[in-house]
Image: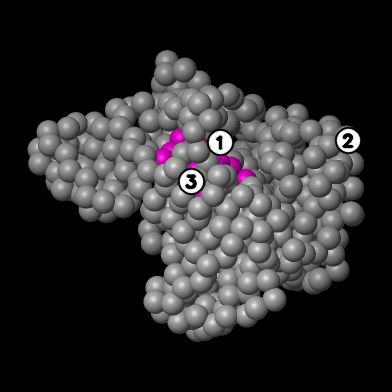
Amino acid sequence: MTENIGRKGRVYPVILSGGSGSRLWPVSRSQHPKQLQPLISNFSMIQETALRFADSSRYPAPVIICNNEHRFIIAEQLREADVSPSLQILEPVGRNTAPAAAVAALCLSNRDAEALLLLMPADHAIADLKAFESAIETAAGVARAGHLVTFGIKPDKPETGFGYLKQGPEIAGLAGPGAAHRVERFVEKPDLATAEAYLSSGEYFWNSGIFLFQASLFLEILGRLRPAMLDACRTAVARGKHDLDFFRLDADAFMACESDSIDYAVMEHAGNVAMVPVDMGWNDVGSWASLWEIGEKDAQNNLLHGDVIVSGARDSYIRAESRLVTAIGVENLVIIETADAVLVAPRGQTQLVKELVDELKTRNRDEHAAHRRVYRPWGFYEGISEGDRHQVKHLMVKPGAKLSLQMHHHRAEHWVVVRGTARVTRDDEIHLLSENESIYLPLGCRHRLENPGKLPLSVIEVQSGGYLGEDDIVRFEDVYQR
């Protein structure tokens, strides 16, 4: 942990990518959550977030904190966006935002004793970047004066889905383009009547979940308030190891860390918390209704995405991912289609989607976790057909990539090349296959698929056997160290 990643005292963007986004099911799933999805543009949410800090003269390259399972997907998406993170920290398990902030502060303070951390989720929408940058400049001055800073969003409606900040007196004598106030108190998500009272008072702001503070000050306060949490994070970093382009926290130490949010663990108990009010077109993209609110709508107030045809529909969000979706005469609905699931709900009740996802888990349904297309560091596979003792998949292998050397105890496979060139290892044999050529892999043989070419390789895989689960894989060698 000795690399230099920027000048001292700079603002370091730290992007948290640990959420599952279950309220945006069926597009968002635990193996491919909302921050990895293109929901508001052609870029995914994490690409959008990282690109806000592309000006290297203003900001160092971002630090990414993510779940171990998402490491290769995030790395590939950032590469596609031409973003090179200064550090990608892998959490073996999710422990909420307070430990994530502690880990980032520990890593950065080792390189820059004066580092300021700009901590933000990977899945928020911000329409006015100039307003955000101005607020960051103000917050940096407040943080250098010894405050932990949060960003408050002026509410424009009585929202019950957000936490609130009660504004205290203005902090005098600060240099910068805007005002800052002490936070009088943090408030939980209110009921409608309370939210209406907050709105009319003018004293309450939405809690954006975006923070800026000195790394050293945060660690000092965390050590006072949650010493066991800080100790566990110190050990996880000290025992961590670099793995390819990632920094992998020590699993045992981090799993022993208590789980809590930065709000509960630190902000609500620290006496030096400030708020910078900002109007920047912020949205936490927490539900389908919130996406409808910020999206571009037609003359009937519909937000339509994908192959959608409507007649007489109004005030609805209809999204097609894989096929034609049609609707007649519907109002105030959300209709979301994917290859293996469809959601239909009143637009005002989309916060309840999480309960539906919990029911899928209770019923042991796979649709809560994965799409038919499952991404891997070498490419992806996608289910085509499944039946008694057989399964058909489409495999796409990126140029220069290769699967692990592996074998199966319960299934045989047949590979047919439909595009590109494949190099296939079968026990002690090496075969080079072109389009329309195939190879049989009997049960128990060691095998590997590689793409030696410069174009994507597409293969149809036919599996047959008594058990076809993904856990029937014995790996002997893997360049991705899985």
Residue 419 visible: no
**Is residue 287 rendered to the left or right of residue 90?**
left
- Taking depth in this image into account, of 111 and 333 the one nearest to the observer is 333
User: Which residue extends farthest front?
Assistant: 442
In this rendering, position of residue 446 left or right of residue 374: right
Query: Please, what is the dominant secondary structure of the magenta stretch?
Result: loop
Is residue 199 toward the left or the right of residue 303 in the image?
Answer: right
x, y (%) of residue 162? 50, 31
**In the image, 105: left or right of 155?**
right
Of the residues shown, which amino acid type is indicated by label 1?
Asn
Residue 331 lies, with reference to residue 144, above or below; the image says above
- Tell which tag, 1 or 2, sits nearer the viewer: 2
- Front residue of 193/240: it is 240
Q: How is the image coloured?
A: one colour
The residue wearing badge 1 is: 207
Which mark lies nearer to you, 1 or 3? 3
Q: Most extreme residue toward the left, as rendered?
A: 312
Q: Are marks 1 and 2 in contact (CB under 8 Å)?
A: no
Instruction: Report the residue at 54% width, 49% height from top.
Output: 465
Q: What's the magenta region?
A: 18-32
Q: CA distance from mark 1 to mark 3?
A: 52 Å
Q: Earlier in the sequence, mark 1 or mark 2?
A: 1
Q: Is residue 93 above or below residue 108?
A: above
Residue depicted at x 31% and y 29%: 345
Of pointers 2 and 3, the one earlier in the residue sequence: 2
| Number of residues whose C-alpha sits closer than 10 Å to that of mark 2, classed few (under 14), some (14–19) or many (20 or more) | some
The amino acid marked with disc number 2 is Pro
Query: Label 2, on which residue?
Result: 227
- Secondary structure beneath dot 2 equals helix
Which residue is at a point 58% across and 75% down the rendered structure image? 424
Label 3 sits on residue: 389
Q: Amino acid at mark 3?
A: Arg
